[in-house]
Image (spheres, grey):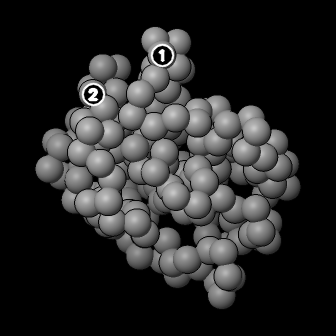
Amino acid sequence: MSDHSNAPNHPSVPAMNWISLGGGRICLGPPPFDVDVSWFSQNGISHIATVLGEHEQASEIRQLAAQANAEWLWVSYAHTGSASEGELMHLQQYVVELRQSLAEGAAIYLHCDNTRLRSQLLFYALCHYCGVPSASAYCLLHSIAARPANSVPRKELAWAAALGQSI
């Protein structure tokens, strides 16, 4: 299920682990602030999915996506493991949009900040929304994430699973 692709020698971009999901593919990475625009097309990235709050320079990523001719998907979300009812509805809509993009064959670069926690949780929720069982979703999370999945608190994984299953 995973496809290991190496990024060019760029200090802020590690090798990416692609996961085939829902007709497309997805990877997790660091915020691409210092990435050359050509890197996205060289790696076949069609969508940049950003999980950053407004105060975390999301507008810079939007500009980068436009320069790279990539579609930009954004959810302004700064918390993990908890959300108000309104935030939950917004996150559910974002997960649905990610799945729709994958169904259309998108290659999605999903990122948040350097911790990558929020992107890991959204990926886990997306897996559950796509009908991937928890044990398999956990294995996929290990495959896709530079940060080991066992460093993500179980309470937050349960929250993400519930988010994906609630849609």
* Front-most of residues 83 and 163: 83
Residue 17 point in image, percent of width and height: 43, 69
* Front-most of residues 68 and 115: 115
Give me the disc on residue 84: 1
Residue 86 point in image, percent of width and height: 52, 12
User: At numbered mark 2, what does the secondary structure look like: helix, strand or loop?
Assistant: helix
Residue 158 point in image, percent of width and height: 24, 36
Give me the disc on residue 131: none
Residue that lies at the very extreme toward the bottom in this rendered image: 9
Query: Residue tagged by mark 2?
Result: 162
* Residue drawn where x is 46% and y is 51% of the image: 117
**Lower position in the chain sequence, tag 1 or tag 2:** 1
* Residue drawn where x is 26% and y is 38% of the image: 155
* Residue drawn where x is 34% and y is 44% of the image: 124
On-image quarter of the C terminus: top left
Give the left or right position of residue 107, taking residue 164 as reference: right
Residue that lies at the very extreme toward the top in this rendered image: 85
- Determine which quarter of the picture holds residue 73: top right
Alpha-carbon span between mark 1 and mark 2: 14 Å
Give the left or right position of residue 68, taking residue 132 as reference: right
Q: Amino acid at mark 2?
A: Ala
Give the left or right position of residue 113, taking residue 155 as reference: right
Residue 115 point in image, percent of width and height: 52, 58
Q: Amino acid at mark 1?
A: Ser
